[in-house]
Image: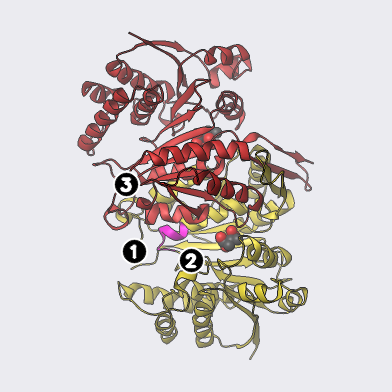
Chain colours: A yellow, B red
Amino acid sequence: ADTINLAVIGGDGIGPEVVAEGLKVLDAVSEAKVARTEYDLGARRWHETGEALPESVLEELRGHDAILLGAIGDPSVPSGVLERQLLLRIRFELDHHVNLRPAKLYPGVRSPLDVAAVAPDGIDFVVVREGTEGPYTGNGGALRVGTPNELATEVSVNTRFGAERVVRDAFARAQQRDRKKLTLLHKHNVLSFAGHLWRRTVEEVGAEFPDVSHDYAHIDAATIYLVNDPSRFDVIVTDNLFGDIVTDLAAAVTGGIGLAASGNINPSRETPSMFEPVHGSAPDIAGQGKADPTATVLSVAMLLAHLGRTDEAARIESAVAADLAERGDAVRSTCEVGDAIAARL
Amino acid sequence: ADTINLAVIGGDGIGPEVVAEGLKVLDAVSEAKVARTEYDLGARRWHETGEALPESVLEELRGHDAILLGAIGDPSVPSGVLERQLLLRIRFELDHHVNLRPAKLYPGVRSPLDVAAVAPDGIDFVVVREGTEGPYTGNGGALRVGTPNELATEVSVNTRFGAERVVRDAFARAQQRDRKKLTLLHKHNVLSFAGHLWRRTVEEVGAEFPDVSHDYAHIDAATIYLVNDPSRFDVIVTDNLFGDIVTDLAAAVTGGIGLAASGNINPSRETPSMFEPVHGSAPDIAGQGKADPTATVLSVAMLLAHLGRTDEAARIESAVAADLAERGDAVRSTCEVGDAIAARL
Ligand SMILES: CC(C)[C@H](C(=O)O)[C@@H](O)C(=O)O
Ligand SMILES: CC(C)[C@H](C(=O)O)[C@@H](O)C(=O)O
């Protein structure tokens, strides 16, 4: 049988705990051999070595079929260091331009919304968030820091090349879905330069997908729709920052970030894609077996789907759906949830 | 008796309809004489004259005590034109750096949230959105537009001067409130230059307000809190773009933009402040008497409070609260809602 060469980065906080359950489920479902290499990256390594991601490790990561990441971040590390030098560095270096984040309200899952009133048709959409541009590039700077005349800028960088490839990816995904509908989120009435680039790109690429309809919402209005009419969305495409914001809200309305999976994808497969729960390292509950590993398990399903193993991916998703349907208010440990899902496979 | 010199800009779409009800309520409550000057600004004027806001009108606006605005925007005008040349121009020229947006769930109002589960302590906070900086400055540009090599940038401009004055305003507001708590929303783990400026400003200004506690949330996480624990917020301070996004979501969870009021305030009073509903011009329902004027009526209350007429402001707010409590699912016209509120004064 074939082999999946998997790089595993448990990371900080609850990262290693949830990743352990993800791997448990992967082992239970996979017909391929899973060859894992664990990389010890995160706060501890940075403290010990001053490096977040050595060049040699980045090169090793490139040699794998995919990467499974738990979570990165610890209060002992200054804000931005691990984010920029580790997490965003991997996304940028491996050209993870499609940051894919499904949002689905599974039966049995409690939403903070009054679902009967605002989402009688359910919630089931996917966000294609651009992953390598926008205000995430690190462009910008500061002058006269610490003085009354301090000035700080942040530059959102947007290219036709960068927008076009994710817009095309999003249209292709929409074409595979029942409703075949794409919504661009932006703020073109204020951010005109970037907004018009994105709008024109959607118009032009949309012409290649005549069976997919498309519309537009300002990012501010979109947050309203996400709570009072989330059923309207099918595929959302948006920039890196708006995508960051909207996917946390999407996770919240579909039952919380404990369930939200994501893939940092290079659709060309020239580099390994990276799969990770949307949630962070949650240092306050780390090591207590309280974290919900479901988001990581669903990220493993996305990983398998990306590698073309769609059957195994679908089996995991069914097992998760079955588990969620019966979960109720039972309090279970991280490990118990992983066991329960694995047992259904 | 004294006189309120009021500039009135009905604007586009439902703007004039809701403003009429705001003025009706203002007349009913005000012990001062209200001297109004109506300014015909918006899509029609732009089409006819090619100008959105003539210099002479801007100068006239400066001579008033306050401005009441309905809404700006029409599909016949290219995106961004009226926004930048009219609405944002007024905000910037009149130095409306405090964009104040209360979010309160009134008794009887239906929220899209499962309020009993996620907000048993109610929702009552206020957002102090910076109004003259951030990505709203129009900084940025585009290169090779319309080619495969197009590049577009948007620059968020942040100054210590600009952040400090709104942070101080927000702390002062928090100090007047029961919970005395301020939350900064930003994304300092990615937008480090601006994020660190804002963070340091909150730390330093916070030292002047020892009785006010303060904390921080990333903008993405904040959208989660807004739907699963909105009671946690008391005063939020944030930049122009994050404030735009979060106030639409705040409006949604407190019953919708039909109820959300705002003030574009220059606390120095050297220029007139402008009060407007958070909603837009809603061209689809314009002229049908369907728009809810409540947001405009509450904006009038904010206007009176800003002019020091706090009693009259409080009377309007009570009348609105009473109307909301009894409203139920009754369908009433714009005018009927205005009449009902005015009748309680
Ligand atoms: C940790 C942070 C840099 C990251 C992001 O902003 O992309 C996270 O919020 C996410 O959504 O994956
Ligand atoms: C119309 C638009 C320019 C405006 C903004 O982005 O500030 C609106 O969304 C608002 O919140 O007042």
Residue beneath label 1, please? A110
Q: Nearer the viewer, residue B16 or B229?
A: B229
Q: Is residue B213 visible?
A: yes
Residue A212 image offset from top left, x and y in percent: 56, 52
SS under mark 2: loop
The local crowd at label 2, few if under 14, some if 14 to 19, many if 20 or more residues have their Cα within 10 Å, is many
Q: Chain of mark 3?
A: B
Please provide the residue range marked out in magenta.
A250-256
- Residues marked 3 and 1 touching at CB (< 8 Å): no
Q: Which mark is residue A260?
A: 2
Mark 3 secondary-structure assignment: loop
Q: Is residue A218 above or below residue A41?
A: above
Left or right for A47, reference B164: right
What residue did someone put label 3 on? Answer: B111
Q: Amino acid at mark 2?
A: Ala
Residue nearer the viewer, A242 or A116: A242
Chain of residue at mark 2: A
Ligand number 1: quarter of image:
bottom right
Q: Residue at x 69, y 71 (%)?
A: A52
From the viewer's perspective, tell me whether residue A2 is left or right of residue B214.
right
User: Where is residue B21 shown, x and y percent of the image?
Assistant: 33, 21
Disc 1 element? loop
Horizontal side of A131 relative to B216 (left or right) equals right
In this picture, residue B47 sits left or right of residue B117:
right
Q: Which residue is drawn at the image coordinates 35% and 41% (left, top)?
A: B177
